[in-house]
Image: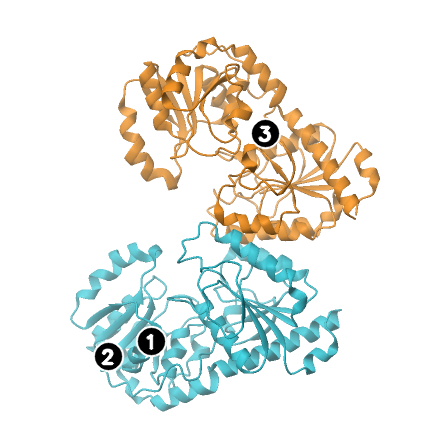
Chain colours: A cyan, B orange
Amino acid sequence: MKSPSFAARSTLRIAQVAPLSESVPPKLYGGTERVVATLTDELVRQGHDVTLFASGDSRTDATLVAPVPRALRLAKSVDPLALHLLLVEQVAQCADEFDIIHFHVAPLHFSLARRLAIPHVTTLHGRLDLPEIVALYSEFSDLPLISVSDAQRGPLPTQNWIGTVYHGLPNRELQFSAGKGGYLAFLGRISPEKRVDRAIDIAKACGCPLKIAAKVDAADQRYFEQHIHPLLAHPLIDYCGEITEEEKGAFLGGATALLFPIDWPEPFGLVMIESLACGTPVVAIRGGSVPEIIDHGVTGFICDNLDEAVDATRRVHTIDRRVCRRAFERRFTATRMAEEYVQLYRRAADAAVFAD
Amino acid sequence: MKSPSFAARSTLRIAQVAPLSESVPPKLYGGTERVVATLTDELVRQGHDVTLFASGDSRTDATLVAPVPRALRLAKSVDPLALHLLLVEQVAQCADEFDIIHFHVAPLHFSLARRLAIPHVTTLHGRLDLPEIVALYSEFSDLPLISVSDAQRGPLPTQNWIGTVYHGLPNRELQFSAGKGGYLAFLGRISPEKRVDRAIDIAKACGCPLKIAAKVDAADQRYFEQHIHPLLAHPLIDYCGEITEEEKGAFLGGATALLFPIDWPEPFGLVMIESLACGTPVVAIRGGSVPEIIDHGVTGFICDNLDEAVDATRRVHTIDRRVCRRAFERRFTATRMAEEYVQLYRRAADAAVFAD
């Protein structure tokens, strides 16, 4: 086990273990891989010695170790499980080269992590409200876990949660903008839990144009065709398809408000902080992380139903966009995220020494 | 590690670790679970102390440890991976209660098995000719593996293969029958690699009725509708749908021959030994395990193309059905399978002692 001097040392040897589904950062959609990319580069910038385990087409300031040459989704992998099992074993093989290992591939590594003689933490990126995972997490109640919102922990309150770390964005990736485009924005996936249909209802009720920049997964194609496509013909609705990272700033920055009318326990919701980074307030339906990200009446409105959301959208000009940007700079930058993770790395290492 | 006396002890404490997808034995289709059921009960019959890790709706003469109450496919599980990870961890937790652990869940347990202080073996039940698995198996080239046919090893020749054990059936489950039904039989799944279309072509060329007892997986529904359903209207063809275990004996025993015109590297092919158990010769297209199971000209014919198969089917009355049954009794019973596995358990245990 590590010596007690670990916590005092200023430079840490850190392993980041990313999923192989998308490159780090992802070429298109892929929230987990985007966060790992941001965290990894920021840890390097802060002076740490970072090794990133990720697909070979990743771009990083850290040392890249790639169990596969290309990200699995775009390479149309037929056995992603085999390759993730290989990833986890390769991490274990060189575990003693690190002070801390940070896993983003739960729950694949749980059995192996339990048997590592090296401190480790795991960030859970997904929803946890599935009854079938309870038994597995109960078995691994000792494993040090990090949530991306307090709300995410709800279904599994008795795990060994060592902290919540909100996601962050590179500080200057998105710029403040005046929101003069004269439209509402919806950005993300078109799927039943994201409820773009509600966004359309809100826009129509307010008589305000809505721009929708969203991808449709293969799994959601039927939902899109049956339930959403017929709604897009309305003159107020402008469906732009999927946009690139480079287009996001202009898209969000030009909007009067971001509509986030979700219908699921959103674990984090990166698009909310992207919006705040542009100075654009968020009109959200309550769920999951929303009340932790949005300050009601300050950086947006948290609504309990569609009528409230329509009313909030009409009043959204009362929100000071500069306050939104400042909330981003205070709470959701990469710098803050990396610093909080380093604190938790030190805490996990101390606990490991103590347990030893 | 185990004491050297292990190899000499007559009663072994054996863990069998089955997949959770189907119960053991399976309610419907499920080759792996059927073999595990047969092996487990036969090991108990031979006097061993056996623990079966499997779904709670399994029926066994061994001690059942069930991480889940019901088999996952019929329970429509949404996260089978989480439950299999739990299974593997639960096995590891009580590993020291056993002399040997026999895994049937590759590759999920590879990392954990490598770190077990208890002898273990793994039977691979599936095809291994997928390029994506090569890197994983290369990483785990030390792990003691058992193949279900020599042919199965082809794509991975440098693994630590400790033996091939052909599958077996309970000695008296299927009875010898005279094959007087006046039809050819096809039994199994309707899928591109099983080539029921070839069976239909053979039957039509021979002018002989063909009975097809086969299930159609959801994944193969489109293939069935587009390519197979139109062929079923021919007066010689009788499509019976999926039949039960109880109906198999009469179905196979009444047939003049089983047609097995596969187009893939069949790892084993249980239906071939079911057929032999009934005294029914097999007309097969060469592939995978076929030349290891069928003795050309003695228990059936191994053909390299459709013309040969038509010719072989016309001559299949020259095969002595009693010789087929005797081949089953000599080579493919549960008793023989269990005895061979016990030999390999002892060999794996000796190797573990040696390594220790």
What residue did someone put label 3 on?
Answer: B167
Instruction: Tell me which label, 2 or 1, sits earlier in the chain.
Output: 2
What residue did someone put label 2 on?
Answer: A183
- Split into 4 quadrants, where in the image is the N terminus of chain A? bottom right
B295 versus A330 height, above or below = above
B310 versus A336 height, above or below = above
Q: Are marks 2 and 1 in contact (CB under 8 Å)?
A: no
* Chain name for mark 3: B
Q: Position of residue A110 (x, y in %)?
A: 61, 59
Task: Identify the element where label 3 is drawn.
Answer: loop
Please state which of residues B211 and A136 is positioned toward the viewer in this rendering: B211
Residues beneath discs 1 and 3 located on the same chain: no
* Chain name for mark 1: A
- Give the distance between the C-alpha atoms of the residues marked 2 and 1, in whole angstroms: 19 Å
A287 versus B348 height, above or below = below
Q: Residue at x 69, y 43 (%)?
A: B120
Residues beneath discs 2 and 1 located on the same chain: yes
Q: Is residue B339 left or right of residue A44?
A: right
What residue did someone put label 1 on?
Answer: A246
Amino acid type of the residue that numbered disc 1 sits on in the rendered structure: Glu
Q: Residue at x 30, y 84 (%)?
A: A316
Amino acid type of the residue that numbered disc 2 sits on in the rendered structure: Tyr
Residues beneath discs 3 and 2 located on the same chain: no
